[in-house]
Amino acid sequence: MSKLKKNDKVKVISGNNKGKEGKILKIYRTKNRVIVEGVNIIKRHTRPNQKNPQGGITQKEAPINLSNVMLIDPKAGEPTRLGMQVLDEGEGKKKRMRYGKKSGEIIVS
């Protein structure tokens, strides 16, 4: 199971788009794939239709493997692995929070 969520800022660590950064737009958990803003851009030839009467070539992001991206630590500004901490909120309530292993900072999403 992935600890990444939508709108997390990530960096691509391997593949053709290595080094690029962007925000997660969509996660396909069953396929272990993720769409990152501005990464893995593909071109599609589209026919003219009611939505797009001109047709032509459109560009959009294609999914990449989840293992090829790493969350950017908000404090350090570098890619980091994620861990989970259980915080006690009092009255017997507990909450699981993600934290960056590099800085130890809790990541609020």
Image (spheres, helix red, strand yellow):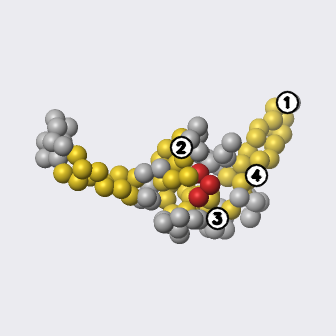
The mark closer to the camera, 3 or 2, is 2
Residue at mark 3 to residue at mark 4: CA–CA distance: 13 Å
Q: Find disc 3 in the rendering and name its residue.
A: 79
Residue 61: percent from left, percent from top: 40, 52
**In this view, 50 is above or below 2:** above
Q: Are marks 2 and 1 in contact (CB under 8 Å)?
A: no
The amino acid on which the numbered mark 1 sits, given as a three-letter code, is Glu
| x, y percent for residue 42 | 36, 56
Q: In the rendered image, which residue does mark 1 sit on?
A: 91
Q: Nearer the viewer, residue 9 or 36?
A: 36
- Which tag, 1 or 4, sits closer to the chain's start? 4
Circle nearer the N terminus (2, 1): 2
Q: CA distance from mark 3 to mark 2?
A: 19 Å
The alpha-carbon separation of the residues under discs 2 and 1 comes to 34 Å
Q: What is the quadrant of residue 91 in the picture?
A: top right
| Of pointers 3 and 1, the one earlier in the residue sequence | 3
* Residue position for label 2: 27
Would you call the spot at circle 3 few (<14 residues within 10 Å), some (14-19), or many (20 or more)?
many
The Cα–Cα distance between marks 4 and 2, rounded to whole angstroms, is: 19 Å
Identified by mark 3, the residue type is Pro
Q: Amino acid type of disc 2?
A: Ile
Q: Secondary structure at mark 2?
A: strand
Front of the two marks 4 and 2: 2
Viewer-side label of 2, 1: 2
Residue 83, numbered circle: 4
Q: Is residue 7 visible?
A: no
**Foreground mark, 3 or 1?**
3
